[in-house]
Image (tube, helix red, strand yellow):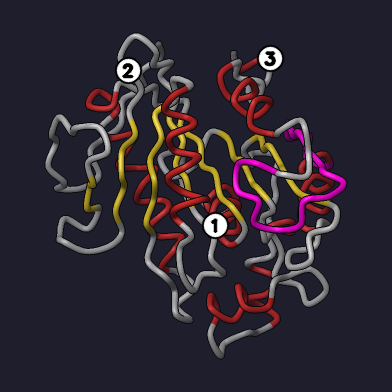
Amino acid sequence: MKKAVFIVVSLFPILLFAQDEVIHLSGQDDLPTLTVFRPAKDKSNGTAVIVCAGGAYAFRSDDGEGISPCKMFRDSGITAFLLDYRLPKGNDTIPLHDAHSAIKYIRAHYMVFNIDTNKVGILGFSAGGHLASTAGTHYRDARERPDFMVLVYAVVSMADSLTHERTRSELMGNAITPEKIKLYSNELQVTDSTPSTFLVHAMDDPGVPVANSLYFEAALLQHHVLVQLWLYLNGGHAFDIHNATAKVQWTDDCIWWIKKMKWKKDNEK
């Protein structure tokens, strides 16, 4: 297992955390927090996934879009971290700060969690998908960059024709400017260094148009970034990890994609 060396970026205590223990990233009894879902030692494959539930940046839908996927990853041998990020209430920098803090914290404590610092990904549903895609397109250095992204019926764009309006208004408040719309339209922020991405969306999503995922896929392809797109004909929005309208679920393919490192280019393996 590769183990890159990172400088500890905080004064957070280094402890042997019990499974499902809550870590306060601020060092205080407040948000943001990480809840750890550890696989059994003989099942762990050294990969970590940070899970960001949706909720239009107004709340966090942790039951279906947080705890359930974390347990699913844990049971498959992937260490999962539920990120309870702070809600922005118009301060657009807050959720991104929390996501990047989580990535840096996990990498800085890789020995505690028995993970590979080169296998730290982020997953988000709906508005949580916007946060995940923002983390993957707005990082400042390698410590903040997720190694892969999983975006499930994600709000990717802030453009009028694509966005989910409540998500945008909760993120930006009264300061919805053309500059911020462009900045947080993550399909416009893709570069050759954007992490590989697994996209999931239903064609009939009434709240977050499937074009969010289609535009993001196109941007990734244009920059030669590895991407897989899983489309459902039906399913609507907020189907969590199980789409009741379909016989085949996205989750098995996603876990295989993560564990087999299909997000890594051949020259990186």
Q: Residue 151 colored magenta?
A: no
Mark drawn on residue 40: 2
Kind of element beneath mark 2: loop
**Residue type, label 2:** Ala
Q: Nearer the viewer, residue 181 or 84?
A: 84
Residue beneath disc 3: 266
How many other residues sit within 10 Å of disc 3, few (<14), some (14-19) or many (≥20)?
A: few
Picture coordinates of residue 237, whole percent (x, y): 70, 58
Picture coordinates of residue 26, whole percent (x, y): 22, 58
**Residue type, label 1:** Gly
Marks 1 and 2: CB-CB under 8 Å?
Answer: no
Q: Which quadrant, please, contains the C terminus?
A: top right
Picture coordinates of residue 264, whole percent (x, y): 63, 22
Kind of element beneath mark 3: helix
Mark drawn on residue 128: 1
Q: Nearer the viewer, residue 49 or 234?
A: 234
State which tag comes first along the sequence, 1 or 2: 2
Would you identify the image quadrant in which residue 184 lies? bottom right
**Residue type, label 3:** Asp
Picture coordinates of residue 233, whole percent (x, y): 87, 46
Q: Could you tell me which residue is drawn at 39 percent across and 29 percent down?
A: 79
Q: Is residue 205 above or below residue 52?
A: below
Q: Which residues are magenta?
A: 222-243
Q: Is residue 146 above or below residue 171?
A: above
